[in-house]
Image (cartoon, grey):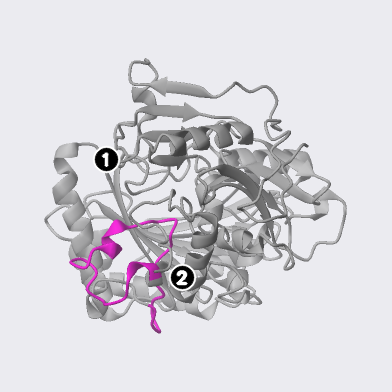
């Protein structure tokens, strides 16, 4: 595989010869799509249809060389540029009216083994499902990435990346060996830079910034390389975690009417307590990935608790049964659904559209999130119950997903992912179809969040219970002092003590602040 090699300063000349050679077979030249092109309207939206851009043109690229050329052209013309890979960003980063050039890298989908780096090269437009399929079919390995197979790796990796295998294997960025980024120097020229995990690499900081520093901050990622940190083999089948052969799925569902408020409180407490007790990397339950889903009482399925586990783990069936029993203890009612089943791993990991909310018409979203070091307290559980059982419909679903385990064995400053002692992530997301509902529904999601975190100014501030928020679930509300009254700025909620270093890296690799949005890292003053 031909690749860009540049071990000098980002302000020095970088070799781009051969950068147009992709690893995914036949590809097209850069395609420029303007307003009078019949393709234009189809390319303006990401997953969240609340935001529709109006750029002067969309440039669809398939090689690193084309990215360099497109970036040079936009910067020379003074046009603000935004980048889209999978399109799953939840805020108005790419559809901002100030964005005049939308760079679509979704056709850069190559996944291959690079023997020179002893690592797998993954182009940033590839989706998680595509990555899982290629790694599994070719070498029987995988990465501990997310459950939504249509998500692009461009943003998923840079923001930290996690999924059902993270409690066993760690975060995605714990496997990041190198990153190829097109940056813009002080002279306004685009250059290709490769930063690696190697401590003596002069571009080591650029690698570090992409281990949780978020997308759209430093440049345009065109390729990642991944391998297990301590791997010494030259056999690619030994350079990433082995993929499971099959996944065991378990779930228990209670109707709202059957459990009442006391039962709901006990269920929430049971889930949080279980996560606290089984959070260590050496816990026998570390391979089990727990989740809890709660929606408004007018929507199915009710109150659901479930988990996934590699069915090859010794005692997987017994572990699942013990988990479901523990979370259901003392509820006062039996679940109306209680099940375990086993499916081939790739079917679960890469099934099309699995995990994405909504349908082709229901694509208007608002997402808010938090890291939790402990489960919810009684005040917070009461707030959740009040909103979920209220007569006024709230579109928000509460999704708790297990975290910790191997993730928490890494120091907070070893990568840009600072949250390294949480037990679960909480996501509060609503999905609806009509623009007429935007204002009311967003207000209700905000009210739920504000009530849950009322004791800390409407935000999950770093304390003994919560630990900020996940940048891959971006929420512009945290930068609004009217909504975040905690006194903790948005960047400390996302990056904590790593933010000053990220600012210095921003200054070095994006001195002109070309790459910016409402939650972008700001150069130091």
Nearest-to-viewer mark from 1 and 2: 2
Residue furthest bottom as drawn: 464
Residue 109, quarter of picture: top right
Q: Position of residue 95 (x, y in %)?
A: 33, 39
The label on residue 427 is none
Q: Position of residue 419 (x, y in %)?
A: 49, 72
Main structural element of the magenta stretch: helix, strand or loop? loop
Q: Residues within 10 Å of mark 1 (few under 14, many from 20)?
A: many
> In the structure shown, which secondary structural element does the residue marked by tag 1 occupy?
loop
- The answer to whether any part of residue 487 appears in the image is yes
In-image side of 320 versus 385 (left or right): right
The one of 519 and 77 positioned closer to us in this rendering: 77
Q: Which residue appears at 33% of the width and 75% of the height? A: 266
Q: Residue under label 1, please give it.
A: 50
Magenta extent: 462-491
Residue 282, quarter of picture: bottom right
Q: Residue under label 2, please give it.
A: 499
The one of 87 and 281 positioned closer to us in this rendering: 87
């Amino acid at each position: 595989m031909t690749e860009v090699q540049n071990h000098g300063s980002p302000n020095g000349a970088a070799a781009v010869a051969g950068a147009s050679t992709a690893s995914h077979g036949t590809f097209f030249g850069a395609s420029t799509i303007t307003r009078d092109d019949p393709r234009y309207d189809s390319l303006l939206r990401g997953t969240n249809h609340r935001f529709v851009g109006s750029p002067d043109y969309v440039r669809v690229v398939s090689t690193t060389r084309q990215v360099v050329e497109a970036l040079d052209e936009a910067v020379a013309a003074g046009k603000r540029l935004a980048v889209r890979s999978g399109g799953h960003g939840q805020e108005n980063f790419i559809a901002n009216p100030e964005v005049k050039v939308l760079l679509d890298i979704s056709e850069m989908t190559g996944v291959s083994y690079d023997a020179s780096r002893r690592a797998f090269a993954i182009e940033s437009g590839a989706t998680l499902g595509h990555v899982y399929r290629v790694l599994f079919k070719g070498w029987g390995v995988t990465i501990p990435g997310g459950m939504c197979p249509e998500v692009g790796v461009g943003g998923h990796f840079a923001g930290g990346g996690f999924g059902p295998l993270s409690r066993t294997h760690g975060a995605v960025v714990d496997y990041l060996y190198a990153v190829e980024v097109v940056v813009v120097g002080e002279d306004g020229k685009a250059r290709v830079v490769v930063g690696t995990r190697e401590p003596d690499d002069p571009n080591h900081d650029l690698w570090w910034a992409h281990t949780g520093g978020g997308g759209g901050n430093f440049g345009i990622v065109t390729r990642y390389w991944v391998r297990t940190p301590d791997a010494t083999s030259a056999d690619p089948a030994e350079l990433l975690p082995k993929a499971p052969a099959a996944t065991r799925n378990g779930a228990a569902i209670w109707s709202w009417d059957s459990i009442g408020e006391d039962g709901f409180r006990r269920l929430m407490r049971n889930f949080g307590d279980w996560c606290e007790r089984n959070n260590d990397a050496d816990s026998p339950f570390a391979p089990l990935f727990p989740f809890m889903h709660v929606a408004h009482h007018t929507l199915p399925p009710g109150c659901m608790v479930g988990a996934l586990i590699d069915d090859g783990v010794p005692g997987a069936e017994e572990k699942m049964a013990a988990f479901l029993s523990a979370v259901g203890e003392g509820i006062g009612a039996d679940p109306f659904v209680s099940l375990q089943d086993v499916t081939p791993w790739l079917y679960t990991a890469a099934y099309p559209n699995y995990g994405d909310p909504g349908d082709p018409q229901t694509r208007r979203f608002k997402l808010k999130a938090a890291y939790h070091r402990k489960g919810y307290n009684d005040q917070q559980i009461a707030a959740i119950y009040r909103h979920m059982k209220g007569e006024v419909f709230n579109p928000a679903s509460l999704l708790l997903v297990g975290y910790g385990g191997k993730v928490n064995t890494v120091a907070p400053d070893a990568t840009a992912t600072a949250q390294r002692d949480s037990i679960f992530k909480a996501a509060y997301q609503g999905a609806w179809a009509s623009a007429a509902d935007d204002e009311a529904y967003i207000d209700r999601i905000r009210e739920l969040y504000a009530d849950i975190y009322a004791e800390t100014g409407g935000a999950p501030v770093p304390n003994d219970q919560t630990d900020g928020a996940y940048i891959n679930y971006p929420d512009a509300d945290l930068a609004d002092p009217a909504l975040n009254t905690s006194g903790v700025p948005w960047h400390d909620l996302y990056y904590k003590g790593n933010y000053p270093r990220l600012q210095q890296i921003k200054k070095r690799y994006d001195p002109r602040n070309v790459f910016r949005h409402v939650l972008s890292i700001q150069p130091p003053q």
